[in-house]
Structures are given as C-alpha cells and as structure tokens.
Amino acid sequence: MINPDALAPLLEGDNAPHFKAAAEGRLSVPHCRDCDHHWFPAAHICPKCLGEAVDWVAVSGRATLWSWCEFHRPYFKSLRDKVPYVVVAVTLEEGPQLYGNLVDTAPADLKVGMALEAVFTPAGDAGMVNFRAAQP
Amino acid sequence: MNIVRPRPPRPAITGIGSTAFGVFPGEDAYSLGSTALRAAMRESGVRADDIDGLIVCRIPDYQRFGELHGLNPQFAVNLPGQGRMAAIALQMACQAISAGSVSTVALVYGNDGRTAGMKYGGEGDGYGSGGAGLWFPYGMTSPGAVHAMMFNRYEHEYGRAGDALAKVAVTCRQHAVLNPGAVMNKAYTTAEYYAAKFIAAPLRLFDYCLINDGGIALIVTRAERAGDAPTRPVYVAGVSTATQLAQSTFAPADYWYSGMRRAAAALEAQSGVAPKDTDAAMIYDNFTPTVLFSMEGFGMCGKGEAAEYVRATDLGLTGRQPLNTSGGHLSESYMQGWGMFTEAVRQIRGECGARQLKKADNILYTCASPIASGAIFSREAA
C-alpha cells in the first residue's frame, strides 16, 4: 500500500521492475518479443498482439511533452509544502506514456510537443522517472 | 402474403424519483437509493411484483437492495459508481425491454460519497485504468488533473479557448439559481470565476463539479404499458455507448472524439434526431473542458471549434439548445449523469418551474469518457 504521508514508488507488484530499474538509472518498460511493442503500466500479455513473450527492456529516455498541469491543491499531506508543482504527461520515443515531475526546467518554458529526457530521482530503494527539457 | 414484423417494444420512463442533494450523515447508498426508488414507484404506479429487471449503480450489492424491497426480478445487476455507467444502465434497461424479455426495469442510483468522505484526488482516487495509485509518488492524482492536461493540450492544438470555460460554468450556475433542488444557488460573475483559486491549473475551483450525497431512480417500461401509469410517459428515443479502453491509462489524444462520434451516429440512427437538433443538451460536466469536447463529439460544432461555438452561442434558457438546465454537475450536484436523466424527464413533462423550457420535445444527454455515451429523451413515441 502507498503511504500517503511518505509517498514513494512501490517495490512490490507488477510495476516494481520499473521503479527498481529507475533506482539504477534505467528507464524500463514491458516489451513484446513477438511484435516489438512497448507499453506501460505493466501487463502480463502484449495489449497489441496478445502474445505472452513479455520482458522488461531499457528504453532511451527520450520523450516528447504530451501535456502538463500545475497542482495547487495538495491532495496528499506530504505535498503540502511542495505546491504548486508540475506533473507532465510524456510520450516516450518507443511509444508508451508516463507521468512524471518536471525537473530542472521552468514551467514557463513548457510547450506541448517539446523534446524531454528522463532523469532519475532516488526515492528510498526505488527510483522515480522524472523529465526535463532535452539537453542540447 | 406480407409478413408484418411486430415492432420491438419501445421503452418509456413512467416514474422518476430523487432525494435532496447535500450532506446527509446517517444515510447510505442503500437508503438514498431506496428513497428515490419508492418515489419513482409511487409516481409510476408500479408495484414490487411488476419490476422484472433491477439495475443498481454505486449501491454495493444488488442482492441486499433487492431483499430490502422484496424484489424478485428476472435479472439484477450492479454497476460501479462511475458516471459513465448512467447511460449503460439506461441502455441495458431499454435493450432488455426492446428485446421483449422484460417489461419493467427499475434503475436505482445511490451515492453517499460526500458523507463517506469520497474524494477524487488523493488516497481514494481510483480514476483511470486499474486505479491511479501508481502515480501518487509523483503527486499525480485526480480526474480533474487529467482534464486539466487535456484542456492544456487542446488549447495548444486549437488555440486559446478565451472565456469558454468561464461561460460554461457561469451559465450552469445561472440555471442552478432557478432550480430549488440545486446545491448551489448563488450566481457568480465571470470575474469571480477567474478570481477563484486554481486546483490543477489551468482549471480553477468553478471548473469542478460538486460531490454530494443523493439518490435517483427511474422506472423504465414498455411504451405499450406506459398508458397505465398516472404520469405522462417520456420515451427513450435513443441511447448509445462507444468505448475507448485501449491505452486508457492516459487520456486519449482526441479527447474521446472518436468514441463520441460513434455514439452520436448510433443515437441519430435510433432516434431520427441529430443530437445538435434537440431542444436542450444535458452535457456531463464533471469538469468544464468535457463540455467543450462533448459539443464537438456530438456534432454541435466541428472538431476544435467548441470555444468559438460557446462564444457565439446563447447557452441559456432562451437559446436554441440550452445547456444543463438544472445547473448540471457543476452547480446542481454531481449525481454522475443520473440527475441529468431526471432533468430531461421533468423538462419534457413541463415540471421545471422557473427554468422550464418553452419547447422540450427532445432532450439530449451526453457523456464524454472512456465510455462515450448519449441518450435522447422524447415527448412523443417515435
């Protein structure tokens, strides 16, 4: 269960490999060996071809900005001192989408479609996948 | 020899019931649904023995609910407490009646979310495919935030929407002021809309619907039987759904447009009425941007044109197609579509007092979501 007072990614459950990989600086998502489809969150079969040859693979971390919003209401106690903060929705080069926090980038510089890159933020034994404007 | 196929039975609503909306400690989904159901049964003259289908929504257990009311229907089912289920419930009832397998279906919605402390952001957030907890560490929670992102992207694609969201919100509140059953009855100005705090920017407080307790019920029966009821029957001329479930952890890049187009086409085929030509539109307004998306999806305007359509159109009671005459989810109460069904019925019956429309022959309901859906309620049987 997520502890709302100390938000951290779960290191158990279907998506644990994603957060464990992030702790090691890799962006990992499920992948189908049969049809080369990538997706997220985890699923035991490929949602494209329904094949069972699923493994986790590291992807590039290159992404484009789908959209974002800025949270002003702290829905969790632990976020009371963090508002306002930005959550971005991104589309990875390999296809899957992710939410993440915006880091090292001014919200005013955001533009739908801009190039982003993943950065990894430690969170206990797990890692979080956040995004910043792609560095030249 | 000509073989004349009998027309399938047509569904009609002969009874509705609703509780007040607000904060009711001591009530729960069963008691709220029960109050509404008994009111709908009284109105329609239907007895427990007449009910041969039971559809409950947001009420935990159909079995317990049936037991509480001494029901032995042919079928019974419960649907989860999601707004997109309202049209599903109506569609199931109408299809069962049209198939000839049942005559009278009770649809019951009970929502104690306000008293239960239900919030759509934070720990209780179950929005999205399989729940939202995965993203909590990023502070990502609430369907409102998803809609804020959609609207942000929408403005990038189609240009700034100007005061479109404000106009939708202010209009709904003006209608709620004329509705004694509405939770909110104080009008606000466009300036006050902009002065309200951001929740998930670009959305502000008045872009969000109102969580409250309440119950609503409908009795749907074969039109041939509707004449036995003491009320004026309201016909369900069409009801349709279309889903977009693939990759639905994230909002679709078309803002559910393709699902809505499918639902709208089915609605027009069933009813013979284009959604844009109905006398009022009850548009599911959990957040103001969905109203814009729905206007496009159901053909009131072209794709990407909703902001200009809202700017140029009178959405009020004197307009060609008034919006959310009860105040909708933004200002009457968030009854997850069900309050829009009862409002459509009351408008067609002519029971709406100060907010009564002069012409209410066909009333539209729409919902933009992973289950896009719509219904047309009609004064006359098709």
Image (spheres, coloured by chain):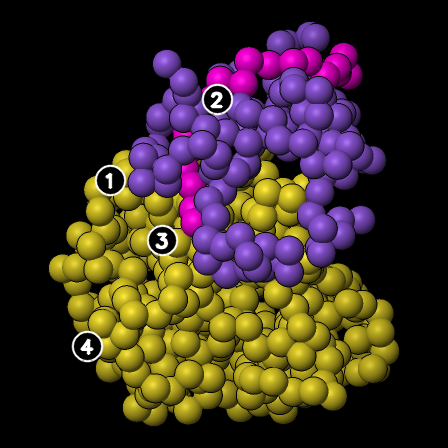
Chain colours: A purple, B yellow
Magenta segment, which residues? A50-70
Q: Amino acid at mark 3?
A: Pro
Q: Kindly report which numbered mark, 1 or 3, lies closer to the viewer in this rendering.
A: 3
Query: In the image, is residue B68 above or below residue B271?
Result: below
Q: Which residue is mark 1?
A: B158
Q: Which residue is mark 2?
A: A117
User: What residue is drawn where x is 46% and y is 58%?
Assistant: A72
Judging depth in this view, the residue of A88 and A22 nearest the camera is A22
Judged from the image, the secondary structure of the residue bearing numbered disc 4 is: loop
- Residue A40 relative to residue B2: left or right: right
Judged from the image, the secondary structure of the residue bearing numbered disc 3 is: loop
Question: Residue A37: x, y in percent?
Answer: 61, 15
Q: Which residue is mark 4?
A: B318
Question: Residue B47: x, y in percent?
Answer: 72, 86
Q: Chain of mark 1?
A: B
Gap between marks 1 and 2, in whole Å? 26 Å
